[in-house]
């Protein structure tokens, strides 16, 4: 099965369009003095997850390319809201970046009051990657050896099965909520502060399953501790090529494609945004960065800021419909 032909249409478009934005970007970059001091890259989730790995990998490469220190600042909590609130208040000079995920599209629908506006308070820089989530259970749990078996057990005893997540409103939570909505099952959601403690409790038997990021689940799958039942994306993953999609495994129409992107405070000058975009694009083309992304199951993307803005708008609308249908509120 070909990986490249099955990614969402927007992903292919972003990759193809990069060539057209680079010449203008190079001209505009010459007017920017960025960076003139240490760059802080805010990760609104705990260390160890896909987002953190991407920020540290790219931060190291950016530091070498730019000759400037890049510090990763983890500010977890409230589904990414705490970190986002912090970044929205920082000086719009390009020295505070934020890597974030679909929370920018989902949180406006999950929380009745946000201390920031994803569109008005931030300027998009680029998409970075899609990292599939994967439905996993303990490898020794023979009662949940397939998606259909899991669904049957959940319907036979509603509320008896639980799924862990990396926190309320994360893609891992929403992957589970979308699963229960499409399958008509009642699963107990157990939120944690990040993937690591959630996986620990899954391995310990405190919860039954998890829609975890490939990044944190893959080592346990390969070690034989966890069994992968299906991917949340519509395409197979080069990191776990043997694992079917959840749609293939029996959940028709299922798709959750967790994307990761870079944003800066809204008033950041366009020339600075262009310079940041170009620097990230260059870092993404580094062989060591490509290898590290592949090792965590990240399918890389580079988009223009305008494409990122369009993607955010479409995802905000799409997730609004899903969240309303599933009746999810976090406050």
Image (cartoon, rainbow, N blue to C red):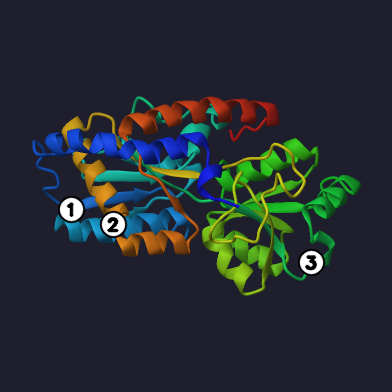
For residue 13, say whether it is visible.
Answer: yes
Numbered tag placed on residue 141 in the rendering: 3
- Residue 115 image offset from top left, x and y in percent: 41, 31
- Residue 129 image offset from top left, x and y in percent: 43, 48
Q: Residue furthest bottom?
A: 223
- Rendered residue at 37%/31% (across/down): 307
- Rendered residue at 53%/38% (across/down): 8
SS at mark 1 in the image = loop
Mark 1 surroundings within 10 Å by alpha-carbon count, few (fewer than 14), some (14 through 19), many (20 or more): some
Q: Nearer the viewer, residue 158 or 25?
A: 25
Marks 3 and 1, the one that precedes in the sequence? 1
Marks 3 and 2, the one that precedes in the sequence? 2
Question: Disc 2 or disc 1, which is closer to the eye?
Answer: 2
For label 2, the residue is: 59
In the rendered image of this protein, does residue 276 appear above or below residue 291?
Answer: above
Q: Nearer the viewer, residue 235 or 157?
A: 235
State left or right for residue 34 relative to residue 199. left
Alpha-carbon span between mark 3 and mark 2: 39 Å
């Amino acid at each position: 099965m070909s990986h490249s032909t099955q990614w969402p249409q927007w992903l292919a478009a972003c990759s193809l369009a990069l060539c057209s934005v680079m010449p203008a970007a190079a001209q505009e970059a010459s007017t920017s003095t960025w960076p003139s001091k240490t760059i802080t890259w805010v990760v609104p989730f705990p260390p160890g997850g896909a987002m953190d790995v991407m920020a540290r990998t790219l931060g190291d490469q950016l530091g070498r390319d730019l000759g400037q220190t890049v510090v990763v600042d983890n500010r977890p909590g409230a589904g990414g809201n705490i970190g986002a609130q912090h970044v929205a208040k920082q000086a719009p000079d390009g020295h505070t970046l934020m890597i974030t995920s679909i929370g920018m599209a989902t949180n406006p629908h999950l929380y009745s009051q946000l201390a920031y506006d994803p569109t008005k308070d931030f300027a998009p820089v680029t998409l970075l990657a899609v990292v599939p989530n994967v439905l996993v259970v303990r490898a020794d749990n023979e009662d949940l050896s397939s998606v259909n078996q899991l669904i049957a057990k959940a319907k036979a005893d509603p509320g008896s099965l639980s799924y862990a997540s990396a926190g309320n409103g994360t893609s891992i939570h929403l992957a589970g909520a979308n699963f229960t909505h499409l399958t008509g099952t009642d699963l107990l959601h157990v939120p944690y502060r990040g993937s690591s403690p959630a996986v620990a409790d899954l391995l310990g038997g405190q919860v039954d399953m998890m829609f975890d990021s490939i990044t944190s689940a893959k080592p346990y799958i390969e070690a034989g501790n966890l069994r992968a039942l299906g991917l949340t994306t519509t395409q197979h993953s080069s990191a776990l090529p043997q694992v079917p999609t959840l749609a293939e495994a029996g959940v028709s129409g299922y798709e959750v494609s967790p994307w990761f992107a870079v944003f800066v405070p809204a008033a950041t000058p366009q020339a600075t945004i262009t310079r940041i975009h170009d620097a990230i694009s260059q870092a993404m083309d580094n062989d060591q960065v490509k290898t590290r992304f592949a090792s965590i199951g990240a399918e890389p993307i580079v988009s223009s800021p305008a494409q990122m803005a369009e993607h955010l708008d479409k995802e905000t609308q799409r997730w609004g419909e899903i969240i309303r249908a599933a009746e999810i509120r976090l406050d």
